[in-house]
Image (cartoon, rainbow, N blue to C red):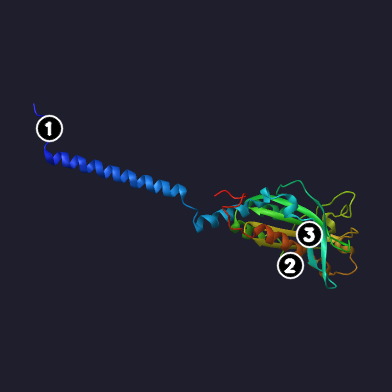
Amino acid sequence: MNSARPWPTLVAASALSLLCAVAAGVAGSAAGAELTRGPTAAELQAAARREVAERWRTWPAGRIFPATLPYSAEQGGRERASRIGISPRTSCDPVDAEAAKALREAGCRGVLRATYVDALQGVLVTIGVVALRDEPGAARARTAFSDSGKPVPGLRPLAFSGTVADRFTPEVRQAGSVRQAGPYLVLTTSGQVDGRPTSAADEQRPAIFAFATEIAEHVLTDLSTPKVPDCAAEEWRC
């Protein structure tokens, strides 16, 4: 019995085998190219955004809140505010109750706080970094805080026993600010070292608290400015 297939069938089978081999080769080449190609510009930008969003967790506390921060002195020239301490807590509750709800609804991930004193050792500032889920959430949360310089609703002061900030309580707050960039809010609350409440101040001098916003801007800029990944650098994995 002749088991040979007709020639047209053999031709079709051979052509089909060739097509499958070519397809497999193309697929293998495409997979290899995908595995070995460098990241695209869009992928690099997305990686940079993710890195910014995680800085509040991955950066050392001393990098977020440097030991000193520069500002313009009220009488002219440049001065530096000195850090008194950093809170070890990262919960989302060190704000007034009416603002805490807005933070939760906007996807608060954590709040970092540090307290500074001005160069003349007369004014205290607590800076709060609020990490939100995303940039739209941060923009929504910002509206819960006073944009007119009033301290309430706002950040609660961070006091440190045995330092010039040991009397920095909520009653001492005289000024506040809020700034937003990317998924972060940076809040400030300010008061005087002597612990006087706002009602006891002889004269309202908003200029003495103006530096608080300036040093907060330094913190926010460093925290929110994207850095394009450098695949050749050790700190990046591409």
User: Could you tell me the amino acid type at mark 3?
Assistant: Thr
Compared to residue 173, the image places residue 56 above or below, namely above
Residue 31, horizontal then vertical, whole percent: 41, 46
Contact flag, marks 1 and 3 (Cβ < 8 Å): no
**Occupied quadrant, residue 193:** bottom right
Classify residue 30 as left or right of residue 130. left
User: Could you tell me the amino acid type at mark 1?
Assistant: Ala
Residue 104, horizontal then vertical, whole percent: 65, 50
Contact flag, marks 1 and 2 (Cβ < 8 Å): no
Which residue of the protein is positioned furthest toward the top in this rendering?
A: 1
Contact flag, marks 2 and 3 (Cβ < 8 Å): no
- Alpha carbons under labels 2 and 3: distance apart: 13 Å
Please tell me which residue is depicted at 89% across the width and 55% down the height of the picture.
164
- Alpha carbons under labels 1 and 3: distance apart: 92 Å
Residue 158, horizontal then vertical, whole percent: 81, 52
Compared to residue 21, the image places residue 219 above or below, namely below
Q: Nearer the viewer, mark 2 or mark 3?
A: 3
Instruction: Name the residue tied to disc 2.
Output: 148
Please tell me which residue is depicted at 73% across the width and 53% down the height of the picture.
63
Please tell me which residue is depicted at 54% across the width and 56% down the height of the picture.
44
The residue closer to the viewer here, 234 or 151, is 234
**Occupied quadrant, residue 115:** bottom right
Q: Label 2: state its secondary structure.
A: loop
The residue closer to the viewer here, 157 or 232, is 232
Instruction: Name the residue tied to disc 3.
Output: 189
- Alpha carbons under labels 1 and 2: distance apart: 93 Å
Instruction: Name the residue tied to disc 1.
Output: 4
Q: Does the rendering let one see residue 87?
A: yes
The mark nearer the N terminus, 1 or 3, is: 1
The mark nearer the N terminus, 2 or 3, is: 2
Which residue of the protein is positioned furthest toward the left in this rendering?
A: 1
